[in-house]
């Protein structure tokens, strides 16, 4: 068994008070926006237009319940305070609740293209003209504008308005790759919250219970423990290998291998990506222990490479190749035998927030990225046999000056027995 280090446990909980220093929310907002401004300056980009609720939260400290992409957005600057374009309702409710944002405007939206073409065209022009006015007021007409997460209609309208549009997503990903002290605390907090879900799974994983029922119990447990949003999925028995997240709901049977994920559970917008492995009603067999031990040791080897000065190629070399499972293409293991940065910034408004770096054999061996202090990376893998069962685990790791530290403390070294008879 490989040796891994664990990060120090938090000495505070998810609530704040006036006599104990936990997560400093003002510092969290300030340091995030400063990182983005520093990145814009480094690339000689004076302004950036960004949408996506979590991305705007990162850039400007505003969030809304994202029922529609581009319903709100923010214009952030290297050298000026941000302008938030808020959706109806939030535009009226939020200015006095978020005084750190000095400038508020009403957002222009064509509801993702669901309105009539003529109306969408008019709204897109109003949208682009509004951005052009803000840039002109700050003397930035003709300067590059980075744009992230907007659709083709938005890009076209901005270009027609005469704006010099540049890709913004790479800058957003670059700025957010290194987590601040408070961001790391948020990720430690959501990892701790997920332990409540895994403990609930110990009681809910019983023969005769639907996988979806267990997942609901786990989700509720994480929300009761302080999650902003709880999330869970359970895969057991013949659905546990390969990891088919689109698999049908099934009834858990005695003896099933089952893994529980809490990916997407969030605290202050920071999502977890964690799996833990269980077996229902009996001790694991020798073969199952062998699968789990092989997987744990392989992932520990990956984790061991997550230190400053190493590269994603160094880490990816320890993942199992596709050929081990009889596959022809490394793409058949994408998101399965894999590691990825995790945080607040969210590409495409997806469930789990993938950040830099991405680590797998598909890309990393030829296109490596540097491992840097302050990255938080989730490391995951799988072992098993098709339609028989499988084991899977995933842990979250912070890269420190002294090397990698696992930030989730729920047991990961053995298969956990649930509902022992």
Image: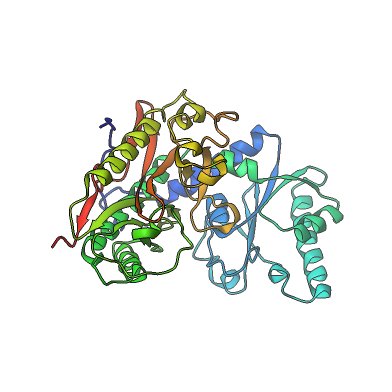
- In the picture as drawn, the residue positioned furthest to the bottom comes out as 116
Where residue 174 sits: x, y (%)? Answer: 58, 38
Image point 52% across, 35% down: which residue? 361
The answer to which of 227 and 396 lies nearer the viewer is 396
Judged left or right of residue 64, residue 204 is left
Judged left or right of residue 24, residue 330 is right
- Report whether residue 10 is seen: no
- In the picture as drawn, the residue positioned furthest to the top comes out as 309
Image point 25% across, 42% down: which residue? 413
Image point 76% across, 57% down: which residue? 152
Position of the C terminus, as image quadrant, is: bottom left
Where residue 296 sits, quadrant-wise, is: top left
Where residue 244 sits: x, y (%)? Answer: 46, 57
- Image position of 177 with respect to 217: above or below: above
Image point 54% across, 71% down: which residue? 93
Position of the N terminus, as image quadrant, is: top left
- Image position of 88 with respect to 75: above or below: below
- In the picture as drawn, the residue positioned furthest to the left comes out as 421
- Report whether residue 151 is seen: yes
Where residue 196 sits: x, y (%)? Answer: 26, 58
């Amino acid at each position: 068994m490989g040796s891994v280090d664990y990060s120090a446990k938090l000495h505070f909980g998810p609530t704040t008070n006036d006599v104990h220093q936990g997560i400093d929310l003002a510092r969290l907002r300030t340091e995030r926006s400063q990182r983005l401004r520093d990145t814009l300056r480094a690339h000689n980009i004076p302004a950036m237009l960004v949408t996506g609720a979590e991305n705007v939260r990162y850039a400007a400290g505003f969030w809304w319940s994202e029922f529609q992409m581009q319903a709100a957005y923010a214009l952030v600057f290297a050298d000026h305070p941000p302008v938030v374009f808020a959706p109806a309702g939030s535009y009226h409710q939020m200015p006095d609740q978020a005084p750190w944002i000095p400038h508020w405007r009403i957002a222009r939206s064509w509801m993702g293209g669901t309105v009539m073409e003529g109306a969408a065209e008019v709204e897109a022009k109003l949208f682009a003209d509004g951005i052009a006015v803000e840039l002109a007021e700050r003397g930035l007409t003709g300067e590059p504008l980075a744009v992230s997460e907007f659709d083709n209609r938005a890009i076209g309208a901005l270009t027609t308005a005469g704006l010099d549009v540049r890709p913004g997503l790479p800058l957003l990903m670059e700025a957010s790759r290194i987590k601040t002290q408070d961001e790391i605390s948020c990720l430690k907090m959501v990892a701790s919250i997920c332990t409540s879900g895994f403990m609930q799974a110990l009681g809910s994983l019983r023969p005769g219970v639907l996988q979806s029922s267990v997942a609901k119990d786990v989700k509720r447990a994480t929300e009761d423990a302080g999650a902003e949003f709880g999330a869970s999925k359970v895969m057991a028995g013949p659905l546990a290998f390969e990891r088919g997240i689109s698999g049908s709901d099934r009834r858990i049977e005695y003896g099933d291998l089952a893994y529980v994920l809490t990916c997407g559970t969030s605290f202050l917008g920071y999502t977890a990506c964690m799996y833990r492995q269980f077996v229902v009603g009996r001790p694991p067999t020798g073969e199952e222990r062998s699968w789990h031990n092989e997987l744990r040791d392989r992932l520990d080897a990956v984790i061991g490479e997550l230190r400053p000065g190493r590269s994603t190629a160094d880490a990816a070399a320890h993942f199992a190749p596709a050929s081990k499972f009889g596959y022809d293409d490394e793409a058949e293991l994408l998101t399965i035998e894999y590691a990825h940065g995790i945080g607040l910034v969210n590409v495409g408004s997806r469930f789990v927030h993938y950040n830099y770096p991405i680590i797998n054999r598909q890309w990393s061996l030829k296109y490596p990225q540097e491992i840097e202090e302050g990255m938080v990376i989730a490391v995951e893998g799988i072992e098993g046999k098709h339609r028989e069962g499988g084991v899977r685990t995933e842990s979250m790791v912070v890269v420190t000056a002294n090397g990698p530290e696992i930030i989730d403390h729920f047991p990961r070294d053995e298969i956990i027995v649930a509902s022992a008879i």
